[in-house]
């Protein structure tokens, strides 16, 4: 029993809160009472008392910083159990616990017990978004900054896009999205911050930053008209490749121009309507945006600039197609996307009210 109590005391003293409390108490004594009284017996030099007092105040400040709450990390995993890489979840948990006072883990198996299939239902994404929003609301009520909530997501790109749309229901939300760097030794890094700036115009610096990492002539992406007429003339496809997977563009173009997609039991893009049935409406045109190098650098400024560039490219293409066709039907979009998950979530957040959906890609 005594050993157990001793271990608890040691854990308390080694914790951030316990260690900070002890440091503040000791530093207060140093700055205001015990140590100055002792020093009087040794020296009368005023500057020594001033130095000790200043050191004590700095130690009090350090103790306060140790005790100060440091936000909430939300680790969200929507991958099916057989595809969840526990090492990635573990890295997110470790990163969150080292950076934040509290960590909330939201797992697919808890939100959707017994559920199978690659994607989770939209209702499950809704629940996840509500849990995150509840944490933000709690911070607001306690007078703390909502940006203290940081999201560590693991999900299919299409589920991440839908999550972004659901999170946009709170117009005041500001949320940081983390991701796992592919570069050796980088670990968990900031991907994109969801805030009002993402919906704004590109600054010259942001435009040059995005252009520097995109291929061909990114200043004016070309809208390509589909030769075969279809009933979906009012729809355009936005094909975005931000990784080294070159085949995704050709696969997406085939789906857009011919309507041929893989079946539910195979890999490939799954063109379905809102009821889950095969979507054979077709497209009127498509637009391709791709990177010029192997992958995007793990830089939050680059991620944000590319996200904003894609947003403006979509809006320009939609307006161009409406002017070109003169159709009375609103121009709709389908996003074929392969890139970092934070950008997929951010695009969903930006386009919450836009007539554009992400096409799910089935993986083996």
Image: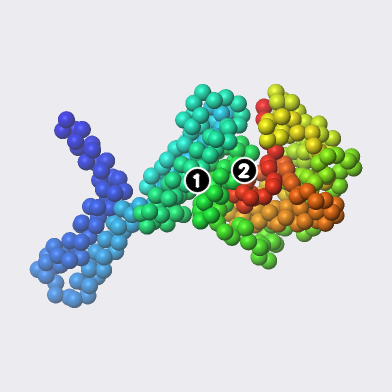
Residue marked by disc 1: 151
The percent position of residue 293, horizontal first and vertical second, equals 72, 49
Instruction: Name the quadrant of the N terminus.
Output: top left
Nearer to me, 172 or 98:
172
> Residue 61's quadrant in the figure?
bottom left
Q: Are marks 2 and 1 in contact (CB under 8 Å)?
A: no
Closer to the N terminus: mark 2 or mark 1?
1
Is residue 47 shown to the viewer in this render? yes
Which residue is farthest front?
A: 328
Give above or below for 276 relative to 197: above
**Few, some or many C-alpha atoms within 10 Å of disc 2 (few <14, some 14-19, many ≥20)?**
many
Give the image's coloring scheme. rainbow
Give the side of residue 193 with respect to residue 149, left or right: right
Extreme residue in the left direction: 41
In the visual, does 70 lie left or right of 75?
Answer: left
Q: Which residue is mark 2?
A: 161
SS of the residue at dot 1?
strand
Residues under labels 2 and 1: Cα distance?
14 Å
Identify the residue shown where x is 38% and y is 44%: 102
How far from the left and from the top, in percent, is residue 357? 68, 42
**Total marks placed:** 2
């Amino acid at each position: 029993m005594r050993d157990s109590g001793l271990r608890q005391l040691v854990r308390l003293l080694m914790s951030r809160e316990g260690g900070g409390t002890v440091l503040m108490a000791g530093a207060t004594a140093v700055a205001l009472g015990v140590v100055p009284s002792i020093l009087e017996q040794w020296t009368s030099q005023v500057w020594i008392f001033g130095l000790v007092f200043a050191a004590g105040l700095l130690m009090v400040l350090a103790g306060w910083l140790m005790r100060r709450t440091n936000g909430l990390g939300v680790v969200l995993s929507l991958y099916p159990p057989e595809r969840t890489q526990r090492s990635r979840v573990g890295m997110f948990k470790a990163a969150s616990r080292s950076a934040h006072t509290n960590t909330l883990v939201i797992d697919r198996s808890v939100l959707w017990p017994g559920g199978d299939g690659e994607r989770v239902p939209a209702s499950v994404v809704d629940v996840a978004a509500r849990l995150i929003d509840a944490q933000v609301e709690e911070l607001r009520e306690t007078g703390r900054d909502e940006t203290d909530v940081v999201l560590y997501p693991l999900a299919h790109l299409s589920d991440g896009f839908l999550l972004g749309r659901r999170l946009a229901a709170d117009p005041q939300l500001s949320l940081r999205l983390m991701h796992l760097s592919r570069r050796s030794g980088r670990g968990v890094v900031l991907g994109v911050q969801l805030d009002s700036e993402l919906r704004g115009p590109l600054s010259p610096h942001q435009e040059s930053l995005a252009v520097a990492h995109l291929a061909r002539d990114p200043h004016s992406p070309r809208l390509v008209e589909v030769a075969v007429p279809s009933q979906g003339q009012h729809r355009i496809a936005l094909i975005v490749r931000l990784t080294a997977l070159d085949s995704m563009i050709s696969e997406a173009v085939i789906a857009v121009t011919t309507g041929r997609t893989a079946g539910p039991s195979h890999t490939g893009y799954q063109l379905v309507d809102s009821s889950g049935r095969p979507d054979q409406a077709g497209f009127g045109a498509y637009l391709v945006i791709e990177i010029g190098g192997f992958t995007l650098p793990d830089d939050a400024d680059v991620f944000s600039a590319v996200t904003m560039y894609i947003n403006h490219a979509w809006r320009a293409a939609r307006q161009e197609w409406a002017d070109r066709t003169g159709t009375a039907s609103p121009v709709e979009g389908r996003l074929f996307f392969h890139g970092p998950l934070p950008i997929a979530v951010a695009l969903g957040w930006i386009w919450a009210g836009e007539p554009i959906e992400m096409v799910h890609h089935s993986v083996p």
